[in-house]
Image: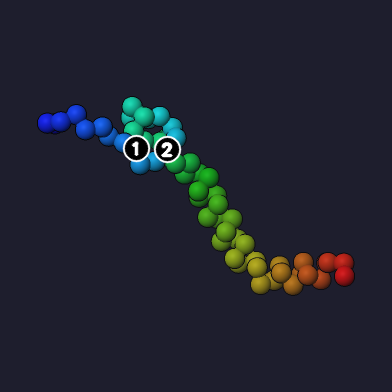
C-alpha cells in the first residue's frame, strides 16, 4: 500500500482480525429463532382464539 490510511471497522464487538471485525455469528441461535418464528406462524390462527377464551373479562 502507498499511504498508511487507517482501516476503520464497520461493525463493532469481538476483536478478531486485529480488532477489524466482530466475532462469528451465533448460527445455532439464529436457526433456533427462525424455527421458533415458523412454529409461531403455524400455530397463530388456532392459538390466538384459544388464549382469548382464557382471558378473564
Secondary element type, mark 2? loop
The answer to whether marks 1 and 2 mark residues whose Cβ atoms lie closer than 8 Å is yes
Residue 54 x %, y %: 83, 67
Query: Disc 1 versus disc 2: distance between alpha carbons?
Result: 7 Å
The answer to whether residue 12 is left or right of residue 55 is left
Residue 20 x %, y %: 34, 33
Question: Residue drawn 33% across and 27% down?
Answer: 18
Q: Residues within 10 Å of mark 1 (few under 14, many from 20)?
A: few
Question: Residue drawn 40% across and 29% down?
Answer: 15
Secondary element type, mark 1? loop
Q: Nearest the camera: 26 or 13? A: 13
Dividing the picture into quarters, in which one does residue 53 lie? bottom right
The answer to whether residue 45 is left or right of residue 30 is right
Q: Nearest the camera: 26 or 3? A: 3
Residue picked out by circle 2: 12
Residue picked out by circle 1: 9
Amino acid at each position: 500500500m502507498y499511504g498508511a490510511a487507517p482501516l476503520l471497522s464497520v461493525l463493532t464487538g469481538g476483536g478478531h482480525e486485529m480488532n477489524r471485525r466482530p466475532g462469528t455469528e451465533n448460527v445455532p441461535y439464529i436457526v433456533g429463532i427462525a424455527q421458533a418464528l415458523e412454529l409461531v406462524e403455524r400455530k397463530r390462527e388456532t392459538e390466538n382464539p384459544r388464549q382469548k377464551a382464557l382471558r378473564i373479562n
